[in-house]
Amino acid sequence: MSERVVAAIDQGTTSTRCLLFNRAGRMLAVAQREHRQHYPRPGRVEHDVEEIWRNVASIVPAALRRAGLGPENIAALGIANQRETTVIWNRHTGLPLARAITWQDTRTDGIVSRLTSEGHGELFSSVCGLAPATYFAGPRLRWLLDNVAGARAGAERGDVLFGTMETWLIWRLTGGPDGGVHVTDVTNASRTMMMDIRTREWSPTLLEALDVPERMLPRIRSNSEVYGTCTAVLPGVPVAGALGDQQAALVGQTCFAPGEAKCTYGTGAFLLMNTGTRIAESTHGLIPTMGYVLGDGEPVYALEGSIAMTGSLVQWFRDSLGLIETAPQIETLALTVPDNGGCYIVPAFSGLYAPRWHPDARGVMVGLTSYIDRGHLARAVLEATGWQTREVVDAMNADSGLPVTRLKVDGGMTANHLLMQFLADVLDVPVERPLGSEAVSLGAAYAAGLAVGHWSNLETLRANWHRAAAWEPAMDPALRRREHANWGRAVDRSYDWVLPS
Amino acid sequence: MVETVTHGARLRNVPGTIQSIERAAAALRLLASTGRPLALAELSAALDLPRPTAHGILRTLREVGFVDQDPTNALYTVGAGLGSLSTPGWDRHDLRSRSMNWADALAGGTGCAVFVGVPDGRVVSLVHHVFRPDGSPQRLRTNETVPMHATALGKCLLAFAPLVTPAARDLDLQRYTGRTATTPAALESQLVAARRRGCATGFAEYTQGVGGAAVPLRGAGGLAVGALGISAPVEHLFGAGGVVRARLVDQLTAAAGEISVTLGHS
Ligand SMILES: Nc1ncnc2c1ncn2[C@@H]1O[C@H](COP(=O)(O)OP(=O)(O)O)[C@@H](O)[C@H]1O
Ligand SMILES: [Mg+2]
């Protein structure tokens, strides 16, 4: 087979996968592997980045084998990754100094409240666009520097490097201790609280406020350019695209025009709207963020609504409660009852993210009566995703003045048609899934393929987008209003559970 | 536990029985009765088998889903597949989830709509539906049902999953178009042809102008657990002489093969 294809690695929260795409954006092969979630204490969630690297080294060849291709058939490799997950490692040994602290981990609450109480909140918002929160990478890096033996001294000597997951993987792929390229991309960098969102460079002022040595930081590059050449896994193949997974999905869903939006449903859910070359301001709890920068092109910004727990609530239902065997079976269970029976679950396990941002909220389950059975709980789990999306869409409409008239969705949870229908019902707009729900991988492939000329322009990519399914709103408006009010009352009950220490 | 082992050991070499099946049964009894994960060494000792033999048995059991192995410490436990023995087939939502990526790729490659169907009494229940990627307005049909005798999906299930579908003579062979098979004999001969080609087809037998082709999705041990079908205007699907286009059937078969791998078919 002589067709050139583009490879993408999607280093996600629950798993890492490798997909190969042809020129039409059609998946030719996929290989996937889950990695372990480490929960050493409440509020802490860690990943072993060496395990993740080993997974990459096994899934990429597996995908090639399935397609009957070799590295010589791969035009370029693109990487998308779980954002804000933070790791430090030794540049000489290639070994991490600690497990990676993931984006759901809340251990930096002390650091974050100190930043705020010391009056830095305004500084961060104005320079990087982000108000200090446990969600972002910078405070995690600070925590590692303060708590891991040898981290700060090593960083100051230039022996210890920082990276988010794409940085770690690119460094390993391009040689590791042996000449590995230490770079990050502008979207991942924009989630660290260390990058000036206007200059797209590390901000010395913010680094000082966080007390992070600049030496350990990767160089910030665009999302679509050749960063280096693989020496491992795909020898000779250029690594030519990198984006945070949510920005990758924005590109994969071809939301290239201002006002176009998508929502990706995985561990969490993330609604991003393209705001063009303008950095949007949010007065409703959304995050202004980088959309993408393609090579020398103009930077495109986005407005983001981040929901911490959607698929992970399903996983909790499966693994911690053991009420289902697989995530998809939650739909089977939910269909055993006609409605939620009056039960609501607010999954504020790590506080509430957009648009409410209540770090002190914790999860609640309300409306319990003897009538409630596991089917109602399954409904409540799914409905929580629907209502959380509704809150983000309302905020988006209020902030952007461009009402969302249809929602493009992707991600693992879009396999759940009951949920997708509920989403259309509570949003009261049609919900559409594109052909290829792996928009994250596709976006990474697009970025890489554009860099090496495999695709010539965005219009060709747009032509690859096809509707695979659509769900039309069908809920009685009075019922929608009632349920919405109930959800709001449930959320009220989750507030202020964590007492100030 | 010791009793189980002697029991398993004693079972060996009973004339007229298949030794490896007996050994597999003994291994399962052992795993089910100890209530903790077991190492290969413990299993081979308890079963009084050489390690490579025990390993072969456990690997096979793992592949069919009767045994699980923890990837971190290589210990064995009883697998989920044993518990679901009495419930034939896959959970329909698991089936949809595992089909989704390849169903999308199939729709993209063939330009057809894609369906996954499972038998539901006398009809086919649509578990998954991917629109035809041509921008035309379409309505999502998941959870709807279609008749068995008049659709490619249904005929595929009748032909390849005979244990979980009714016999042709027990179906209500309603006429939908001039082409619907309305006698058991006519239907039977179509099923024979489907088995011969490995693919069932429907030529405007349910809806005027619309055709389909479907092949089985197989799980562990090769059991058909559902059907994967493509659907499009008949002229898109069928070439000269009303023969379904080979390029489309090849893609359909390849996608079904990929999905079947995720369902445990080897
Ligand atoms: N059919 C389903 N119904 C509900 N949730 C699902 C379903 N399938 C997968 N999920 C959830 O989606 C998540 C996996 O989706 P994925 O896009 O792979 O996430 P990530 O990229 O964050 O790892 C898991 O949290 C899982 O619980
Ligand atoms: Mg993902």
Image (tube, rainbow, N blue to C red):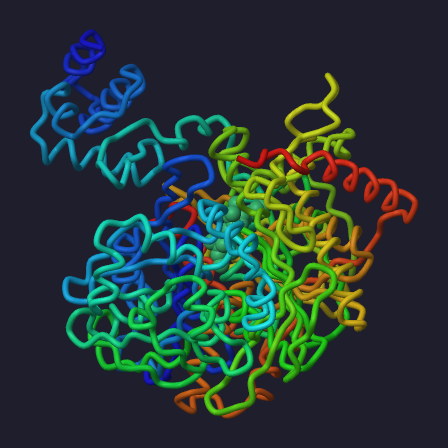
B124 vs A451: above or below: above
Observer-nearest of A190 and A366? A190
Q: Which residue lies furthest to the front in this view?
A: A118
Residue B170 seen anywhere in this rendered image of the structure:
no
The image quarter in which residue A211 lies? bottom left
Q: Which residue lies furthest to the top in this view?
A: B3
Observer-nearest of B108 and A367? A367
The residue lying at 16 percent from left, 10 percent from top is B6
The residue lying at 84 percent from left, 52 percent from top is A474
Residue B196 seen anywhere in this rendered image of the structure:
yes
Image-based side of B48 in relation to B230, left or right: left
Image-based side of B40 in relation to A318, left or right: left
Q: Position of residue A204 (x, y in %)?
A: 42, 74
Image-based side of A403 in relation to B182, left or right: right
Image-based side of A147 in relation to B103, left or right: left
B64 vs A322: above or below: below
The residue lying at 25 percent from left, 55 percent from top is A50
- State the quadrant of the N terminus of chain A: bottom left
Observer-nearest of B58 and A112? A112
